[in-house]
Amino acid sequence: QVQLVESGGGSVQAGGSVKLSCVVSAYKFSRCRMGWYRQPPGKERELVSFIRSDGTADYADSVKGRFTISQDNDKNTLFLQMNNLKTEDTAAYSCAAEVGAFCGLWHWGQGTMVTVSS
């Protein structure tokens, strides 16, 4: 059973930075995609970024140039570096791992809250 445990959330002022970590167990890195989602208070969950098995990444337009996704295969850890944070980045952030023989099925962690104040 794949398990994902996020850490690094907290409160930060606008313009600040936060780095989220996600330790993943029972999962083979670099086989399928991994990513970060977020759910702002009272809104739907949305994709923030994902990284493919070849190391390339995509980002939501709202975070391009400010967020960077990366992974450490040796430590089974996924990261999300978030810079120049805005109040609209306030959300519960969850990491996710794609599973299945052909990928396509996503498992999520419990999430960690990031609150950005003005």
Image (cartoon, grey):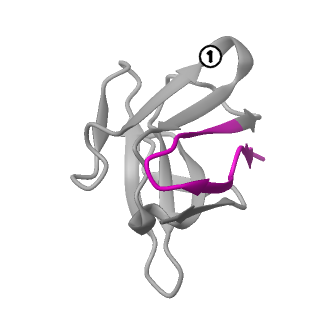
- Residue farthest toward the bottom in the current orientation of the protein: 42
Q: Nearer the viewer, residue 30 or 11?
A: 11
Residue 86 image position (x, y, % from top left): 40, 58
* Residue kind at label 1, given as amino acid type: Asn
Judging depth in this view, the residue of 6 and 55 nearest the camera is: 6
Residue neighbourhood size for the residue with mark 1, other residues' Cα within 10 Å, grouped as few (<14), some (14–19), many (≥20): few
Q: Is residue 51 above or below residue 91?
A: above
Residue 100 horizontal/vertical position (percent): 53, 45
Q: Determine the residue positioned at 56% across, 49% down.
A: 96
What main secondary structure does the magenta stretch of the protein show?
strand
- Left or right: where does residue 6 sit relative to residue 78? right
Q: Most extreme residue toward the front, as rendered?
A: 118
| Total numbered labels | 1
Disc 1 element: helix
- 112 up-or-down from 90: above or below: above
Mark 1 lies on residue: 73
Q: Which residues are magenta?
A: 1-22
Farthest residue to the top: give it.
74
Residue 111: % across, % down: 68, 60
Residue 32 among those drawn in magenta: no
